[in-house]
Image (tube, grey):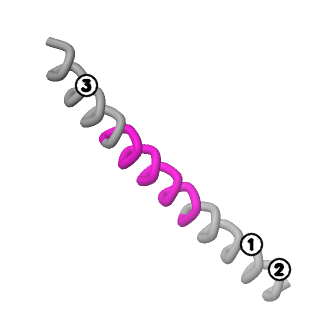
Amino acid sequence: MNVLKGAFTFMAVSTLIVGGVLVAGTIIATKGVDSAGDKLQEKIH
């Protein structure tokens, strides 16, 4: 029972870490695209 509880805890922590990395990656990518869009808009106008 203790092993099962440890495995479940490990899975929950891993899921939170992976989710955090995905969210952070998405935010960074969005900022990069937004910055590139701003530069493109300055060139056009």
Q: Nearer the viewer, residue 27 or 17?
A: 27
Residue 44, position as x, y percentages in the image: 20, 15
- Find disc 1 in the rendering and name its residue: 8
Image mark for residue 40: 3
Residue 38, position as x, y percentages in the image: 21, 27
Q: Is residue 12 left or right of residue 32?
A: right
Residue 2, position as x, y percentages in the image: 79, 87
On whether residue 18 falls in the magenta region, the answer is: yes
Q: Nearer the viewer, residue 25 or 39?
A: 39
The Cα–Cα distance between marks 3 and 2, rounded to whole angstroms, is 54 Å
Q: Which residues are magenta?
A: 17-31
Which amino acid lies under the numbered mark 1 shown in the image of this protein?
Phe
| Figure quadrant of the N terminus | bottom right
On whether residue 2 falls in the magenta region, the answer is: no
Q: Nearer the viewer, residue 7 or 5?
A: 7
Marks 3, 2: nearer the viewer? 3
Q: Main secondary structure of the magenta part?
A: helix
Q: Are marks 1 and 3 in contact (CB under 8 Å)?
A: no
Q: Are marks 2 and 1 in contact (CB under 8 Å)?
A: yes
Which amino acid lies under the numbered mark 2 shown in the image of this protein?
Leu
Question: Residue shown at 29%/27% (left/top)?
Answer: 37
Q: Are marks 3 and 2 in contact (CB under 8 Å)?
A: no
Q: Where is residue 42, by image quadrant?
A: top left
Q: Is residue 28 left or right of residue 19?
A: left
Which amino acid lies under the numbered mark 3 shown in the image of this protein?
Leu
Indicate which disc, 1 or 3, sits on the residue closer to the N terminus. 1
Indicate which disc, 3 or 2, sits on the residue closer to the N terminus. 2
The local crowd at label 1, few if under 14, some if 14 to 19, many if 20 or more residues have their Cα within 10 Å, is: few
- Find disc 2 in the rendering and name its residue: 4
